[in-house]
Image (spheres, rainbow, N blue to C red):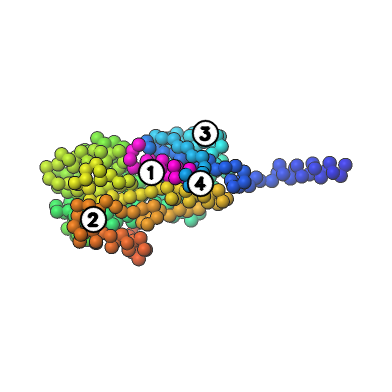
Amino acid sequence: MKNIFIAILLTVVLLASPVLVNFAVSAPLKAAIILPGTKEDGGWNTMAFKAAEQMKKELGIQTAYSENVTPADATRVAREYIKDGYQLIFFHGMEFQTQALSIAEKFPQAVTVMHTAEMKEMLPKNVWAVTMNFYQNWYALGVLAGLKTKTNKIGVVGGIDFSSYIANLNAIRDAACRFNPGVKVYYSFCGTFDDPIAARKAAESQIDMGVDVILNMVDLGIYGVVKAAKKADSKVWLIGMDLPRADLLPENFIGTSLHSFGDGYTYIAKKVIEGMKSGNYNMRPGQGMYIGELNNISSEIKDTVLKVYQKIEKKSFIPAMTIEYIFKSGAACGQ
């Protein structure tokens, strides 16, 4: 009778106790990535696909991905992955912050990963944040643009004006103005990263205003910017983003802000396997961000750009970060 009572008591205690999920013990980790676009875009979403392949190769885990997911549909997609046993969900884009937090709250057995422009000190117990300090990389490329221009007019063609991309824009202008006080920065956000026609029109408009260096912050849209540069009556220099793109127009590209999520996503997955369900991964120059394809420029300009980048990488100089619009397109430095 005593043994029966103890057995019943243990059953009640176990049922009443919270279940602590330890992925290292409970099951092999399965990770999914939710993409806002196609993995064939040669940029943002291609990087996520490469990250999935790296996690699979280095950690031996099962990975999956869904393409062209809108914020309105992201919650449903994440729910389906969790239903299928996926414990780690990467929301690959700033537009998914709300969905990442919501899923984490509703499914405490899962871990979600969201992107942020600033470091998050207080995070839910099952949320990782990837802080994207892209603006630090773009500062060095702002130096490049400011020194390369002959017309003293540089342009930025962007997709959606997320806070991180506004920070990029402000960093570009700060750098360009510091090294060339006579420069003016023009900018256009197309509302999408993947519309070559919209990006081409934005680039053509800037070229008509005298812009001779265009910094690309678009994905598939870059094909439209390249087309505009090809048709221009005078030379238009190009700076790319995410992955090497100089092959699209080698004689016009002067640099690229290279980004990689592979190491960061793999690091997070490894930590989750070890039982660490929340934390920050800080992407910055030297850690998931680099500059490359510095071509068609003088050795003096190249040396200056690399020195600035190295200072940022070593943290001996950190550019200011401003996530609100602080200047109008085409405004002179100081205005």
180 versus 211 height, above or below: below
Q: Earlier in the sequence, mark 3 or mark 4?
A: 4
Q: Earlier in the sequence, mark 4 or mark 2?
A: 4
| Front-most of residues 305 and 152 | 305
> Is mark 3 in CB contact (under 8 Å) with mark 1?
no
Report the number of discs: 4
| Front-most of residues 303 and 329 | 303
Q: Earlier in the sequence, mark 3 or mark 1?
A: 1
Which residue, given by chain and number where applicable, does mark 3 sit on? 80
Q: Amino acid at mark 4?
A: Leu
Of circles 4 and 2, the one toward us is: 4
Q: Which residues are magenta?
A: 40-56
Which residue, given by chain and number where applicable, does mark 4 sit on? 59
User: Is any atom of residue 50 visible in this view?
Assistant: yes
> Is mark 1 in CB contact (under 8 Å) with mark 2?
no
Q: Amino acid at mark 3?
A: Glu
Q: Quadrant of residue 174?
A: bottom left
Query: How many other residues sit within 10 Å of disc 4, few (<14), some (14-19) or many (≥20)?
Result: some
Which residue, given by chain and number where applicable, does mark 1 sit on? 47
102 versus 288 height, above or below: above
Q: Position of residue 67 (x, y in %)?
A: 41, 35
Q: CA distance from mark 1 to mark 4?
A: 18 Å
> Is mark 4 in CB contact (under 8 Å) with mark 2?
no
Q: Earlier in the sequence, mark 1 or mark 2?
A: 1
Of circles 3 and 4, the one toward us is: 4
Which residue, given by chain and number where applicable, does mark 2 sit on? 144
Q: Position of residue 167 (x, y in %)?
A: 33, 52
Of helix, strand and loop, which one carries label 4? helix
Q: CA distance from mark 4 to mark 2?
A: 38 Å
Query: How many other residues sit within 10 Å of disc 3, few (<14), some (14-19) or many (≥20)?
Result: few
Direction left: furthest residue? 233
